Amino acid sequence: MAELPEHGSPKAARILAAAGELLLSRGSKGVTIAEVAAKAHVGKGTVYLYWKTKEDLLLGLISRDFIALADEVVAAVTADPELARPSRLGPNMLEVAARHPYVNALQTGDDVLLGVLADDPRSATLLETLGAGAFLHHILPIWRRHDLARDDWEVADQAFALQALLAGFLTTAPSLKSRLPVEDPARVFAAAITALLGPERATPEQVKLAAEEGIRSLNGGRSVALAIISG
């Protein structure tokens, strides 16, 4: 695959940075190519050399954020395979997602920031491959195979319950934290995952194998996000 434009072009990098600042401060409806170009100190034509439409540019930003998240999780699990345990990986993903504003916006359905981008098929593809709920759906069978999750009920039902749990924490934990006496929502989330999936009986070797499979899954999703950027 060709190198991303910002890797070889300072102008492209400035355009992405400018578009990111405008997207976060105004939402997609408030972003125009003219303003992006002015903020990046380039002409409008230069922006169109790299991106055909405003939507391509902004979805490129979101895709890059998903790639950055995947890279962060892969690096962490590579350094510490024990992080692949459900009770650790779930809270870690919540923590990592909080550091990626575009990922968080897409996962929580932030219409103010996303606007029409929320309905773009490419956004759905990102959620289906690298969204936290989708990733947990993909990794659940891995956990089950390696004694990290109970396997005495239908995997589809278990995946639904797990994704519902994650969605609840993603959408309600930030707003409820100030009103409930919970100092560490991640700890509560870890306990909830264990209550749902059961005790983790895996050996260290099984955990290592689960980590390797999980990394392959993330890298597969990363390739999809790169393909979206490349068009």
Image: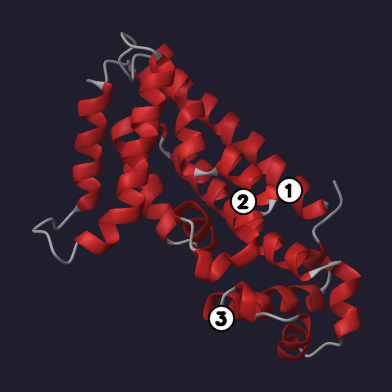
> Which sits earlier in the primary sequence, circle 3 or circle 2?
3
Kindly identify the residue that appears in the image at 60 percent across and 30 percent down. Answer: 216
Kindly identify the residue that appears in the image at 30 percent across and 48 percent down. Answer: 169
Position of residue 50 in the picture relative to residue 118 (left or right): right
How much space separates mark 3 and mark 2, taking CA atoms?
A: 23 Å
> Which sits earlier in the primary sequence, circle 1 or circle 3?
3
Three-letter amino acid code at the position of disc 1: Leu
Among the 4 quarters of the image, the one containing residue 147: top left
CB atoms of marks 3 and 2 within 8 Å: no
How much space separates mark 1 and mark 3, taking CA atoms?
A: 26 Å
> Which sits earlier in the primary sequence, circle 1 or circle 2?
2
Q: Where does label 3 land, which residue?
A: 26
Q: Where does label 2 land, which residue?
A: 67
Q: Judge whether residue 112 can be spotted in this image.
A: yes
CB atoms of marks 1 and 2 within 8 Å: yes
- The chosen color scheme is secondary structure
Q: Where does label 1 land, which residue?
A: 226
Local packing at callout 3 (Cα closer than 10 Å; few below 14, some 14-19, many 20+) is: some
Which residue ends up furthest to the top in the rendered image? 152
Three-letter amino acid code at the position of disc 2: Ile
- The label shown at residue 70 is none
